[in-house]
Amino acid sequence: MVQKALSYNKNSKERKNEMERLRHIGNFYHNSKVLVSGEGELLVAKRPPSGASVRYEDYTPCVYCKGFYIAVDIWKHCKDCKFKKTGDSFLCDQDDQKPQKAGLKDSRMLMASLNQSHQNGKDESSHGQLFGTMKMDSIKMVCVNDEIISKFGKNILSCKGKDHIPFTRAKMREMGRLLEKVRQTDENDETQSMTVKDMLHPAKFDMVVKGIHSLCTYTLQEQNNVPQCDIPSLALKLGHSLRKCAYIKQGLCIRSEDLNGEKAAAAFIKLMDMEFTQKVSSIALSTLKENKKPSVLPVTSDVVKFSSCIQSKIVSLSTELQNAEKESCPATFQSLAKATLSHIITFNKKRSGEVGRMTVENYTNRSAVGNEGNQDIFEMLSTVEQKLSKRLDMMSIRGKRGRQVPVILTGDMTKALELLVDPDIRVKAGIVPENRYCFPMSRGSIFNIRGCDALADTVKEAGLKNPGSFRSTNLRKYIATVSQVLNMKEHEIEWLAAHLGHDIKVHRSYYRLQEQHLELAKISKLLFAVDQGKAHLFSGKKLDDVQIDEEKKMTKALSEMKDTDPINFYLDWIYG
C-alpha cells in the first residue's frame, strides 16, 4: 500500500487519499490494542466539538476506511465514505432499513474481529457471533476481556445453539455488570483489575454479595424493616450464573493442575450453598411473590374474535403476497409472517419463542396424520376425527429442554407457510439464504421474528376487549383451566400436557391456576346440600349430578346474561 501511494505524483489527490487510508489503518490497529488492553489514547478520524462529553465507547470504526467516528453518526459517514468501492452495498439504501442503524452492525462485527485478533486461543466463529452485534460500552469490554465470561457464553451457545445468541449475550452482560459493580465497591488497584476468576474466591464472597445487593437495589421496608429487592429476577439469575462460572473456573484449574485455584472455586461453591440463599435468594423470592399479580385469563369472546380476524387477515395477505411486486413484497411478506406466527401460537397455545424458531426444515419434513403408515390407527378414529385428520397437518419443533413438541397446522396456516418457505418469494422479499427460519426477519438478518412481538402487534390490530391478557402464557393457562370442565381422563390430560410441551406435574402445578376455584365450586355444592339438610337426597350421585337451590339460581342468571364469559361469571358468582 505504501508503494502504491508513492507511485502517485507528490501533490496529487490520489496520493493524499492513499496516505489518508494508510493513516486510518495504522490508527485502527493502534486503537485495537488500546481497547483490548484498556490503556492508551484513541486516535479518531474526527474529534468531538470542544466541551462535548464523549466516552471511548461512543466511537466505532468505518468498515470501508477503518477510521473511528461517533457511533450514532457512523451511518452518515459510511454512506458517503470516499473509500467505499463501486458496487459495495450500504444498508441505508434499503427502504426498510432505519438509516441510524445502517453501517453500525457491520462496524460492530469489525470490532469483534478486531478484538478476536488479540485474543489467542478463542474460537473465532463463536467470538464474532457473541460480541459482533453487542452494544459497544464498558460492559462489552469487560465481557470481551474476561476469560470466564467468554467461556460461560460459549458453553451456553454450544448447549442451546445459534437460536439463543441474544439470550447468551444477555447472560454474559449480566455477569459483566456484576463484575463492574464489584470493582466499584473498592477503589484500590487490585480490585479495579479484578476478573471473574479472581472474584470467584471465598475471600471475595462477601464482596460479591455486596455487589449483587447494589446492582439489584436491596433495601429495607420503612414499616417493618423487612429486606426487599427492586430487581429480584436479576438477583436469582446471577446466583445461577455465578455457580456455573465457579464450575468453569474449577474445570480450567483442574486442566491446568492449579490446585489452589481448584480449592478456591470449590470453597466458593460451598459458600454459595451455605449462605447465598439467606443473603440473596430468599429475599428475592419473597419479593417476587409479593409483587406477583394474579393472572387475568383471556375472555372467551376475545379468543373467538381474534381467531376470526387472524384467519381473514392470513387469507388476504396470502393472496396479496402471491401477486406482490418486488417493491411491496418485503412489507407484505413480513405482515404475513407475523400474522401466521401469531395464529399458530394462539391456535396451538404454544410458547411464543418455540414457534418463532420454527425452521424451514421442520416444515418440509412434516408428515401427514392420515397417511398409509398410520392407517390402522386412522381407521380407529371417529368419522369427525378422521375428517379433521385429513384437513390438518402436524409437525414437530424443538421445545423446552430439547423435547420435541407437536404443532398442528390448519389449511390456512399450511397455505401461508408454503408461501413463506418458497425460495423465490424469499429472495424477492429480501430474505438472505442463510436465514433458515419460517418466520425470518428482514434487512439481511439471520434471526427470526420474536413470537411475543408478533402476537402483541397482531392483538393491537384486532381491537380486543382485554388485549393485555392475550399473551401466550395466559392462553396456555386458559386452555389448561378450561380443560378441567371437560372431565378429561388421565391419559387425555397427558396428551394435552405433551402438546403444550411439559409433563403432567408441571401442567397441574403451574398452568391450572384456577383449579382451586373449580374445586371450591364443586365442594360448595356439597356444603350447601348439607346446610339445607338435603344431603340424603343425593345418595349415590356424583358431585356433577348434585343440583341445589343456589346452583339453580346461578344457572337461571347465567341464561339471562349475554356477551358474558361463562368461566369468569362462574367465578364471580362464587365470590359474590
Image (cartoon, grey):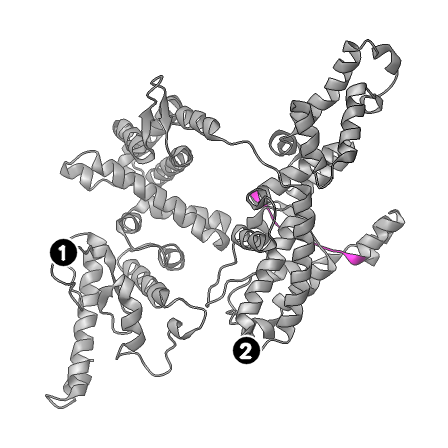
- Decide which of tag 1 and tag 2 comes sooner along the chain: 1
Which numbered dot is residue 40? 1
Label 1 vs label 2, nearer the camera: 2
Residue 333 lies, in percent from the top left, at 57, 67
The N terminus, quarter of image: bottom left
517 in relation to 135, above or below = above
Image quadrant assignment for residue 68: bottom left
Residue 477 lies, in percent from the top left, at 63, 37
Image quadrant assignment for residue 58: bottom left
Name the residue at 31% across, 75% down. Answer: 79
- Is residue 484 covered in magenta? no
Residue 486 in view in this figure: no
Residue 56 lies, in percent from the top left, at 20, 56
Badge 2 is on which residue? 326
Of residues 565 and 48, the one drawn nearer to the viewer in this rendering: 565
| Main secondary-structure element of the magenta-colored stretch | strand
Q: Which stretch did the figure color magenta? A: 391-400
